[in-house]
Amino acid sequence: YGLFINPDNILNIGIQHLSENDIRYAREKNFKIKLVPTARKISTKQLVTYVLPKFVKSDDFLYNVENEYNGVTVQAAFADKQFFFGKGAGGHPTGAAVLSDIAALRYDYRYEYRKYNQHNGLLHTDDVNLEVYLRYTHEYTVEKLQIENIVERFSRDDYKYVIGNVNLKNLIANWALLEQKDVFIAHTGKYTYTEQQIEALAQEG
């Protein structure tokens, strides 16, 4: 997208605290849980980036990406949705990447950064609302993250979760909380917009 973004400004939450309850919930809904980095234009002028576990539906290209394989989905303006699939680990893929780097050094290859040099006016933002699944232990977790419009809630002694909307800014502000062992968060794949955000998008158009 032609932007340089400090990695510290990109929310990056892994799957190290995934539990049997989370997996069971996903299976009951016919989802799989995948760790998905996202770079997405939410308007003509704004780009949002984050890394979160995601509930992937059976009709999603990423649903059948397993083991050492990686998948990349690209949505283009005139080419619709494209999917790239291949090994991301193992001897041969790693060897090919190392050989490519050596060749680049040998021939003094330099990336052109064409989009960066075009100065297209695109800005990085964290003002987007995501629908998330949040498994937690303490009620203050839900309050601190400011989860709103809760559409599903479950609670028993050993397992609590909610599904609701949260602003990406709140997730970044509470990054340390999301990395605690008793917390697991996943994006459902849905985005929501406040009235103010809708008005701002209309003004852009």
Image (cartoon, rainbow, N blue to C red):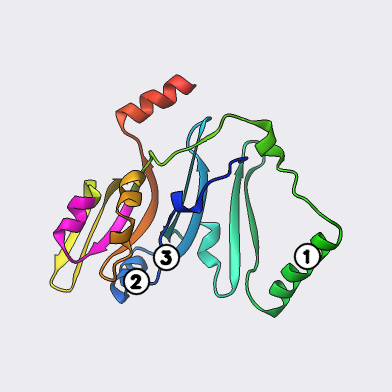
Mark 3 crowd level (few <14, some 14–19, many ≥20, 10 Å Cα): some
Residue 137 locus on image (x, y percent): 19, 66
The local secondary structure at tag 1 comes to helix
Rendering quarter of residue 85: bottom right
Residue tagged by mark 1? Answer: 100
Q: Residue furthest right?
A: 107
Q: Amino acid at mark 1?
A: Ser
The local secondary structure at tag 2 comes to loop
Q: Amino acid at mark 2?
A: His
Whole-angstrom CA distance, mark 1 to mark 3, is 28 Å
Residue tagged by mark 3? Answer: 14
79 over 144 or under it: above or below: above
Q: Earlier in the sequence, mark 1 or mark 3?
A: 3
Magenta stretch, residue numbers: 131-144
38 over 118 or under it: above or below: below
Rendering quarter of residue 57: bottom left
Q: Residue 114: which disc?
A: none
Mark 1 crowd level (few <14, some 14–19, many ≥20, 10 Å Cα): few
Residue at figure coordinates x 38%, y 43% from the top left: 191
Residue at figure coordinates x 50%, y 63% from the top left: 63
Rendering quarter of residue 199: top left
Residue at figure coordinates x 32%, y 72% from the top left: 24
Mark 2 crowd level (few <14, some 14–19, many ≥20, 10 Å Cα): some
- Does 132 appear in magenta? yes
Residue 21 locus on image (x, y percent): 28, 72
Residue tagged by mark 2? Answer: 17
The local secondary structure at tag 3 comes to loop
Whole-angstrom CA distance, mark 1 to mark 2, is 35 Å
Residue 148 locus on image (x, y percent): 22, 45
Tell me the quadrant of the picture where the N terminus can be found: top right
Q: Nearer the viewer, mark 1 or mark 2?
A: 1
Residue 60 in the figure: left or right of residue 163: right
